[in-house]
Image (tube, grey):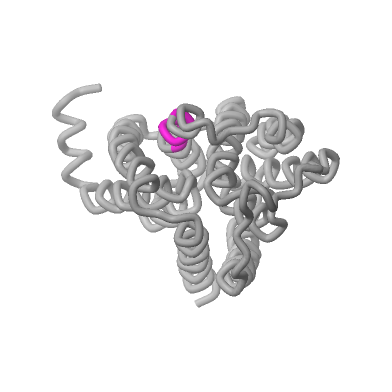
């Protein structure tokens, strides 16, 4: 990459870079990658949609990689319990990455789904503890959920955590931090699979100058956000923060694609 070109790219897109940094800090603090917000921001730039999806997935990978490392180090990951969720999600995320979609219809559907999930999570007062959680994991159901979400994730250009986390909260799947850990791993593997699926398409295109700058930006923001979550969020605050985050994303999507 030419330094002069990188400097020009930075100056021209400083506002996008700043927004990506803020999104990375916010999303990583609750175990998400931020793919839905990256898509919304990039959609305002006039970049072709196929390129937007690839950039969002790469940013997801960078942000949640730091989260996954910290969650594993903190022993918040139960790989045996997570495996059914990602068993079918990985190949279906790859398949989704090869599919062309109607952008407007999907985002309207996404907006209403997330808004419903956010309201339900906010009204729910129950927080699962280690003694209360249900240890009887329904593997077939989890595999089905994971596969469906994985396909949508690869198709749209998000990691799927924005779908998975509300579902796990609403079904009392585990404690809030372990749900955040599970969402991070789910986002990571599906973002990688979805990007590979998109990369395999003959019309794949990406602006590596802008993308490179954004990847460095979200890496820094993700490191800050993932560490702040342990310092400042109690389990109930983590759940409430997730609900606020999902509601914010859903309302922004609905405003953009309906009005």
Magenta stretch: give its range: 64-69
Residue pictured at 51% horizontal, 43% vertical: 53
Residue pictured at 83% horizontal, 45% vertical: 141
Reply above or below: 234 against 99.
below
Q: Position of residue 173 (x, y in %)?
A: 69, 50
Residue 117 in view: yes
* Residue nearest the viewer, comparing 31 with 96: 31
Q: Position of residue 202 (x, y in %)?
A: 59, 28
Judged left or right of residue 30, residue 101 is: right
Q: Quadrant of the N terminus?
A: top left
Judged left or right of residue 62, residue 203 is: right
Residue pictured at 41% horizontal, 37% vertical: 63
Residue 203 in view: no
Reply above or below: 242 against 251.
above
Place residue 203 in its image quadrant: top right
Queried whether the magenta region covers residue 65, the answer comes back as yes
Judged left or right of residue 139, residue 30 is: left
* Residue nearest the viewer, comparing 13 with 111: 111
Q: Position of residue 69 (x, y in %)?
A: 45, 28
Chief SS of the magenta region = helix
Place residue 170 in its image quadrant: bottom right
């Amino acid at each position: 990459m030419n330094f002069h070109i990188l400097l020009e790219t930075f100056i021209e897109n400083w506002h996008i870079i700043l927004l990506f940094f803020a999104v990375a800090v916010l999303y990583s603090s609750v175990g998400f990658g931020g793919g839905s917000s990256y898509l919304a921001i990039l959609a305002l730039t006039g970049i072709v949609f196929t390129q937007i999806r690839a950039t969002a997935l790469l940013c997801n990978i960078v942000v949640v990689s730091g989260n996954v490392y910290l969650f594993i180090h903190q022993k918040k990951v139960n790989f045996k319990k997570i495996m059914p969720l990602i068993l079918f999600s990985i190949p279906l995320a790859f398949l989704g990455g090869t599919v062309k979609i109607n952008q407007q219809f999907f985002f309207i559907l996404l907006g209403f789904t997330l808004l419903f999930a956010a309201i339900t999570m906010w009204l729910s007062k129950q927080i699962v503890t280690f003694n209360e959680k249900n240890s009887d994991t329904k593997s077939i159901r989890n595999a089905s959920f994971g596969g469906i979400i994985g396909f949508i994730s690869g198709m749209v250009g998000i990691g799927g955590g924005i779908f998975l986390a509300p579902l796990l909260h609403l079904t009392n799947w585990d404690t809030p931090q372990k749900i955040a850990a599970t969402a991070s791993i789910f986002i990571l593997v599906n973002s990688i699979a979805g990007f590979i699926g998109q990369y395999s398409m003959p019309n794949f295109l990406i602006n590596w100058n802008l993308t490179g700058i954004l990847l460095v930006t979200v890496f820094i923001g993700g490191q800050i956000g993932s560490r702040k979550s342990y310092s400042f969020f109690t389990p109930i605050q983590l759940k409430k923060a997730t609900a606020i985050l999902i509601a914010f994303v859903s309302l922004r999507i609905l405003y953009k694609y309906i009005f």
